[in-house]
Image (cartoon, rainbow, N blue to C red):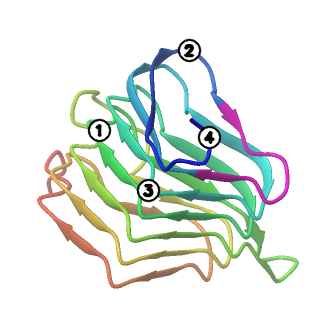
C-alpha cells in the first residue's frame, strides 16, 4: 500500500502515460515495460521535474521526452528501447539562458537495435547548458550521445560497443 517502497509496473499502453508539465513533479521507482507506443514520460514545458530510479524495458518509442529547464533524470535503467531512450531539450543560447537539465548515473543497453533508422542517438541532447554525466551506454547500433546544442556538458560517461551501423 501507500507509504511502502514497493515497485509499480506498467505494461502495454498507448500514448503518453505521464505529462510532466507541472513544476516540481517527481517520478520515482516506476517500471515501464512492454508495448508502449509513445514516450511514456513527456513534458513540453517541464520545470524542475525529477525522474529517479525508474526502469524502461521494451518501449517502442523514446522512453523520456523533456523540453524545459532544471529537470533531472537520475539512476534509471533503459533496456531494449526501440528508438532512442531520452530526448532532453532546454535553454537558449540567444538569451544566454542555460537549461540546467541533467541525465546522470543512468544505464542504457540495447537501444535502437530492433528498429532500423533511428533518428538520433541513445540520448539526444539539445538546447543550451544541459549535461549528461556518469552514464553507461552499450550495445547499440546508433550514436551514444547526439549533441545538437551549445554549451552542453558531457562528462565521465562510459560508452562501448556502440555505433555498429556506421561506417566510413
Where are the magenta residues, as a range? 18-27
In the image, residue 84 sits, relative to residue 15, either above or below, namely: below
Determine the CA span between mark 4 and mark 1.
36 Å
Q: Which of marks 3 and 4 is in front?
A: 4
* Picture disc at residue 123: 3
Quarter holding residue 148? bottom right
- Residue 87 in picture, x, y percent from top left: 55, 50
Residue 21 part of the magenta-drawn span: yes
Determine the CA span between mark 1 and mark 2.
19 Å
Instruction: Determine contact: label 3, label 4, CB under 8 Å.
Output: no
Identity of the residue drawn at 72% across and 44% down:
43
Residue 84 part of the magenta-drawn span: no
- Helix, strand or loop at label 2? It is loop
Q: Which of marks 1 and 2 is in front?
A: 2
Q: Quadrant of the C terminus?
A: bottom left
Instruction: Pick whichever of labels 2 and 3 is earlier in the sequence.
Output: 2
Instruction: Pick whichever of labels 1 and 2 is earlier in the sequence.
Output: 2
* Picture disc at residue 2: 4
Amino acid at each position: 500500500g501507500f507509504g511502502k517502497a514497493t515497485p509499480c509496473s506498467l505494461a502495454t499502453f498507448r500514448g503518453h502515460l505521464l505529462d510532466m508539465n507541472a513544476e516540481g513533479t517527481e517520478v520515482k521507482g516506476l517500471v515501464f515495460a512492454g508495448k508502449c507506443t509513445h514516450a511514456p514520460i513527456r513534458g513540453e514545458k517541464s520545470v524542475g521535474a525529477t525522474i529517479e530510479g525508474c526502469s524502461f524495458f521494451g518501449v517502442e518509442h523514446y522512453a523520456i521526452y523533456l523540453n524545459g529547464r532544471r529537470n533531472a533524470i537520475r539512476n534509471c535503467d533503459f533496456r531494449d528501447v526501440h528508438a532512442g531512450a531520452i530526448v532532453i531539450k532546454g535553454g537558449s543560447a540567444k538569451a544566454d539562458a542555460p537549461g540546467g537539465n541533467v541525465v546522470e548515473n543512468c544505464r542504457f543497453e540495447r537501444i535502437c537495435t530492433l528498429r532500423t533508422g533511428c533518428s538520433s542517438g541513445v540520448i539526444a541532447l539539445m538546447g543550451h547548458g544541459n549535461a549528461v554525466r556518469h552514464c553507461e551506454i552499450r550495445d547499440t547500433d546508433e550514436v551514444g550521445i547526439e549533441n545538437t546544442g551549445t554549451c552542453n556538458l558531457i562528462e565521465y560517461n562510459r560508452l562501448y560497443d556502440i555505433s555498429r551501423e556506421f561506417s566510413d
